[in-house]
Image: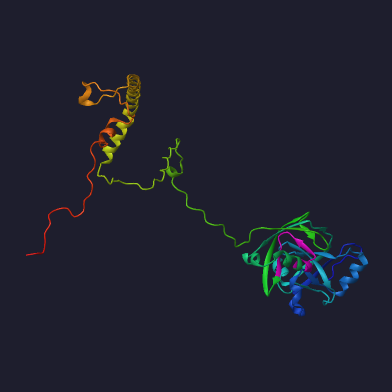
Amino acid sequence: MDRQDPSSSTFEQFYRCYPVAFLDKPHLEKGNKVIMPPSALERLASLHIDYPMLFELHNPSIERVTHCGVLEFVAEEGLIYLPYWMMENLLLQEGDLVQLRNASLEKGTYVKLQPHSMDFLDVSNPKAILETSLRNYSCLTTGDTILVAYNDKKYYINIVETKPSAAVSVVETDCEVDFAPPLDYKEPEKPAPTSKANNALPEVLEEEPPLKKFNAFTGSSRRLDGKQLAELAESTASSVVKQPQIEGKENSNDSKSALASASVQQSGKLIFGANQKRPRERDETTNIPAKKRSQEPEKGEQEPKFHAFTGKKYTLKD
């Protein structure tokens, strides 16, 4: 259906839309490029449209808009073939009217995507898959849901945000891609809050008791000599207390004995027990103590000689 004004420099047409599956070209479902009639090419060539050719698709009944590119001009006159996911975005049925208008879009610098399922994040290399899939797309529009096919599985992804405008061109451009949490993502459940009394911290923290040190061989003990430990402890304590006194006494006794020995050495006499009253003469022979001299045998007394076969004699005669 041609409603183009010949004097206008803008391409604008109404077409009946059908899915690309009607042309036996299912591979076109992996992008956002449409099939247009040959008459559209003649009109676009006369308007000197910039390449790549980009268009705005508008569903006038519900005022929904998206953008697309063109792949071929082989459709029947008055018809246009769209990927089925684009018809779903525009809420179009087979044979519905759609308005097509040429558009000039800026090159995208930022795109935020949101997968419908967490399964897409389980793919080995999502970045490489997106780079390969987006080659089939000429432009992206905020609010659209695009289709990414991988390993015979279809992944639907929402276009959450695009910069620098709501619709951008992704042909021959470097674009930053960000991901939002998937639609089926669930945050881990938080633990149930405890009572206020438990949550309220005490104003003064109680001091923690010191940790007990490890003591080996604990328990009661016994001595081999049979003494009790209490008696042993008392005896050791008393010995420690009395030790300085004993040491003091010993020092005094040592001093006295030293004086006494000095006096004895000066007098040259030794006094023994009961013989203190008898005067003894100085031992002139040797300096051997008296005890040793008393143990020595006297010279006059000789030891008896050994005589063999002593005793009575007996004979064998009758």
Left or right: 21 as drawn, with respect to 75 = left
In reply to whether residue 146 is colored magenta, the answer given is yes
Quick one: 116 or 269, which is closer to the camera? 269
Q: Provide residue 283's location: percent of width, then percent of height.
A: 30, 26
Q: Provide residue 8's location: percent of width, then percent of height.
A: 90, 62
Q: Quadrant of residue 121?
A: bottom right
- From the image, which quarter does the C terminus lie in? bottom left
Q: Provide residue 143's location: percent of width, then percent of height.
A: 71, 60
Q: Residue at x 64, y 66 (%)?
A: 122
Residue 22 appears in the picture as rendered:
yes
Farthest residue, direction front: 317
Farthest residue, direction left: 318
Colour scheme shown: rainbow
Quick one: 36 or 97, which is closer to the camera? 36
Q: Provide residue 247's location: percent of width, then percent of height.
A: 34, 26
Q: Residue at x 78, y 55 (%)?
A: 165
Left or right: 189 as drawn, with respect to 31 = left
Quick one: 185 or 143, which is closer to the camera? 185
How many numbered marks are there?
A: 0
* Above-or-below relation of 101 to 38: above
Q: Residue at x 76, y 62 (%)?
A: 140
Farthest residue, direction bottom: 24
Residue 92 appears in the picture as rendered:
no
Q: Quadrant of residue 186?
A: bottom right
Q: Quadrant of residue 293?
A: top left
In reply to whether residue 223 is colored magenta, the answer given is no
- From the image, which quarter does the N terminus lie in? bottom right
Numbered range of the magenta stretch: 133-148
